[in-house]
Amino acid sequence: MLNLTERQKQILALVIRDYIETGQPVGSQRLVEVYELTYSSATVRNEMGALTEMGYLRQPHTSAGRVPSEEGYRYFVGQLMGNTDLPVPTKRMIVHQFYQAGTDIERWMRLAASVLAHQSQAASVVTAPHSDTSVFKHIELINTRGRQVLMVLVMTNGEIRQQMLALAEPVTQEQLSQVAQRLNNLYQGLNVENIQASGSPLEALEQDITKLIIEDIRQSSHILGSEVYRDGLNHVLDDPEFSEEGGARRALRIIEERPLLEDLITRTVLSTELGGVQVLIGGEGTYEELRDCSVVLARYGHPDLATGTLGVLGPIRMPYGRTISTVRFVANLLSNLVVDLHAE
């Protein structure tokens, strides 16, 4: 990273802020007039030329103005933007929305995705909280029709997994309830290893259900847990910044397709501190799908309980201060939810 003078830092920050607001190339005369700079237009023009040579600005076509490069945005976010925070009324409104949702974890996930999308005017993604080592809480077996049985498995982190089973022969609801009660007594508070090592004698049906429980718990320990919540995809599809045909759809693949999302999370925020925000601009040379956009991600939760990931995907010309503040604030709210759920 090149060393910039204080004047160059000021001019770069003003160009980026002005371009984010207007979407138009920024000229030296505009900077002097709008921001009442104390030096001449010629001086500003020379500094903008130097910033262009350094790779922080670029000149589109034959326009006299400059726009930020990806490297310029990265320098702005990392060095010039400083700490930002949401306005107090906005934070109060968001907290009130979450308060009205009670402690229903699914409602919180959907609300988090909605708030992120609305506040950033971009696409949002929220993964349900999950533990690296999921723990059995209880199971329900519900007779539906014939040999069809609904198995509902609940983890201690609040995650719920459901699947339909086809039994070899019909079983009454009373028998199913007895099996569920016995397995609840045996496995409550245990992880997969503990369940496998329990060594309790089991009937044939109990053995079959236990195998399914182990399989489900292993799947719930996967990086994304069971559910991924998305919102605001229309903001990306309608954004004029994605002028290239198919550009918006290409960008959205990263949060719509589970393997791509898992890879993104693994390579970025999975090893960062909880509540810390990570910004990817233009794919960072790694993700071709993201070459036209930026992603702001954060982890939430508690390391000893359960964690998840949330974030926003939008054009490179996004309001980074507001977006980063929103992602950080919502991540902190969800972290509190995880702790509260486990306290109960």
Image (cartoon, rainbow, N blue to C red):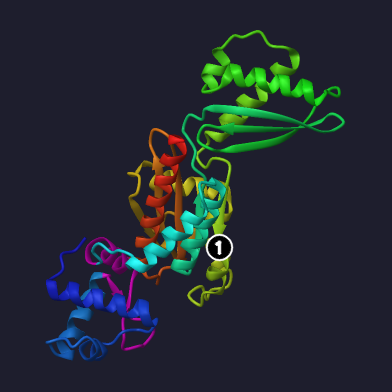
Label 1 sits on a secondary structure element that is: helix
Task: Give above or below for 262 relative to 327.
Answer: above
Residue 162 spot, x, y in % from top left: 67, 37
Residue in the image at 26% along x and 64% along y: 75
Residue 44 quadrant: bottom left
Foreground residue among 126 and 330:
330
Residue 261 spot, x, y in % from top left: 51, 50
Q: In which quarter of the image is the N terminus?
A: bottom left
* Amino acid type at mark 1: Arg
Few, some or many residues within 10 Å of mark 1 (<14, 14–19, 20+): some
Foreground residue among 32 and 56:
32
Horizontally, residue 68 falls left or right of residue 28, namely: right
Residue 47 spot, x, y in % from top left: 18, 80
Residue 61 visible: yes
Task: Return the residue at label 1.
Answer: 250
Residue in the image at 31% along x and 65% along y: 71
Foreground residue among 54 and 254:
254
Horizontally, residue 167 falls left or right of residue 58, namely: right
Residue in the image at 37% along x and 56% along y: 329
Residue 126 spot, x, y in % from top left: 50, 52
Indicate whether residue 65 is drawn in magenta: yes
Residue interval drawn in magenta:
55-80
